[in-house]
DNA sequence: ACAATATCCTGCGAGC
DNA sequence: TGCTCGCAGGATATTG
C-alpha cells in the first residue's frame, strides 16, 4: 500500500508513541524476516531517538547510532498498541516498548523488509544508496529534475517509478501525477519537451504535498484520478480509461485527457 | 540503456 | 463448493 504520502501517514500516526521509548524485547514471527536480518534481537535495551523517512523507507534511529530501515513494500503496515491486545494474524515483528506498548509490523504478503545499519551513511542498505532526491524538499529542483530526466529515454511512467530519479513515487501516485499533467504513461521521456517537463515537475510536488497534508480525506476525493481509476472511468471527462502494462504492472490513463 | 519477464509472498474476487 | 486465473499503492535480478 505505501507510497510517500502513505509512509508519511504511518510515521505520523506512530511517532509520539515510539520516540523516547526503550525497547524491552523483540520477537520475530516470520522466518524469512529473521533470516534476512539476524540482528533484530540486539535492539533490546536501546532507546528510539527519532523516526524519519527516506523515499519509502521508514528510518528508526536508536541511541547507539544505529538505524533500523523498514520497507513496507506492498502490504506492510506499522501499528502501535497495548501488549494486551490480540496479535493480528499477519503480524511479522513485535517490538516491546517501555510503557507497555508494542510496535507491530503487520504484512500480509511478507514482502516487507527490516534492515539494521550500523551507520546509515556507510551504504549498508542497498536500496538507499542510489535513492534520488526527496520531492518535497529543496534538493528537488526543476533544474536537477530536468538534467536527470534528460539523461534517460523510455516511458515516462518507468522514470517516475525509478526511485533514483525521484524518491517515493509508486504505481498509483505515478498514474495520478501523469493524469494531472495530461501526459500518457507511455509517452517517451525524450519527446516531452520543456513545458511538459516543467508541468510534470510541478505536479509531482503539488500532488505529493497535497496528499500528505490531506491524507485523511483522500478516500473521499472524487475529483482525484485515483477515485475513477478503481471504477474505470475518467473523473474529468467521464469516459472509459485505458490501461497498459509497464514494468510488469498496470498503468491507467484517460486517452482523451492525457494526449502528450 | 531500455523493455519484458520472473521472483519474492498471500488473499481476494471473477469465472467456470 | 471448489478450482484456476488475474490482480494487488514494491524492488530486484536476469535475459533479450
Image: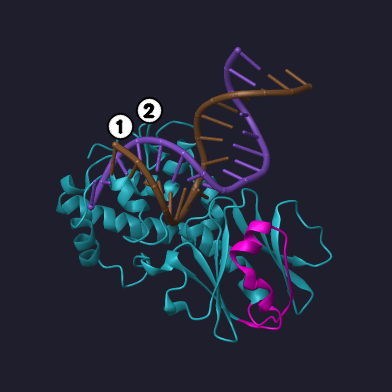
Chain colours: A cyan, B purple, C brown
The disc, 2 or 1, on the residue closer to the chain's N-terminal end is: 2
| Residue A214 in view of the camera | no
| Residue linked to disc 1 | A255
| Residue linked to disc 2 | A239
Left-right relation of A222 to A23? left
Instruction: Give the extent of the magenta segment.
Output: A19-48
**A29 falls in the magenta region:** yes
Query: Which dot, 2 or 1, sits closer to the camera?
Result: 1
**Percent x, y for residue A220?**
54, 46
Left-right relation of A71 to A38? left
Q: Quadrant of residue A101?
A: bottom right
Asked whether the residues under the numbered discs 2 and 1 touch, taking CB atoms below 8 Å apart as contact, a structural biologist would say yes
**A39 falls in the magenta region:** yes
Q: From the viewer's perspective, is residue A21 above or below residue C2?
A: below
**Percent x, y for residue A138?**
32, 73
Question: Which residue does the image show at 28% across and 58% down from the upper left?
Answer: A201
| Residue A95 in view of the camera | yes
Left-right relation of A245 to A184? right
> Are labels 2 and 1 assigned to the same chain?
yes
Amino acid at each position: 500500500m505505501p507510497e510517500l504520502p502513505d509512509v508519511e501517514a504511518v510515521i505520523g500516526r506512530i511517532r509520539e508513541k515510539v520516540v523516547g521509548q526503550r525497547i524491552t524485547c523483540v520477537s520475530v514471527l516470520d522466518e524469512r524476516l529473521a533470516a534476512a536480518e539476524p540482528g533484530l534481537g540486539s535492539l533490546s535495551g536501546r532507546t528510539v531517538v527519532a523516526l524519519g523517512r527516506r523515499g519509502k523507507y521508514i528510518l528508526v534511529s536508536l541511541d547507539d547510532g544505529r538505524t533500523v530501515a523498514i520497507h513496507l513494500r506492498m502490504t506492510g503496515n506499522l501499528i502501535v498498541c497495548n501488549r494486551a491486545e490480540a496479535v493480528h494474524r499477519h503480524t511479522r515483528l513485535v517490538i516491546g516498548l517501555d510503557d507497555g506498548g508494542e510496535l507491530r509490523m503487520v504484512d500480509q504478503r511478507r514482502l516487507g523488509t527490516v534492515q539494521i545499519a550500523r551507520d546509515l551513511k556507510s551504504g549498508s542498505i542497498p536500496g538507499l544508496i542510489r535513492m534520488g532526491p526527496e520531492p518535497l524538499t529543496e534538493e528537488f529542483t526543476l533544474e536537477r529534475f530536468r538534467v536527470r530526466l534528460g539523461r534517460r529515454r523510455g516511458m515516462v511512467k518507468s522514470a517516475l517509478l525509478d526511485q533514483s530519479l525521484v524518491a517515493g513515487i509508486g504505481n498509483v501516485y505515478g498514474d495520478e501525477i501523469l493524469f494531472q499533467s495530461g501526459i500518457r504513461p507511455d509517452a517517451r521521456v525524450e519527446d516531452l519537451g520543456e513545458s511538459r517537463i516543467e508541468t510534470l515537475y510541478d505536479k509531482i510536488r503539488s500532488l505529493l504535498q497535497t496528499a500528505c497534508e490531506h491524507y485523511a480525506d483522500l478516500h473521499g476525493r472524487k475529483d482525484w484520478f485515483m477515485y475513477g481509476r478503481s471504477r474505470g472511468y475518467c473523473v474529468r471527462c467521464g469516459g472509459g480509461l485505458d490501461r497498459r502494462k509497464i514494468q510488469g504492472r498496470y498503468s491507467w490513463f484517460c486517452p482523451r485527457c492525457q494526449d502528450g
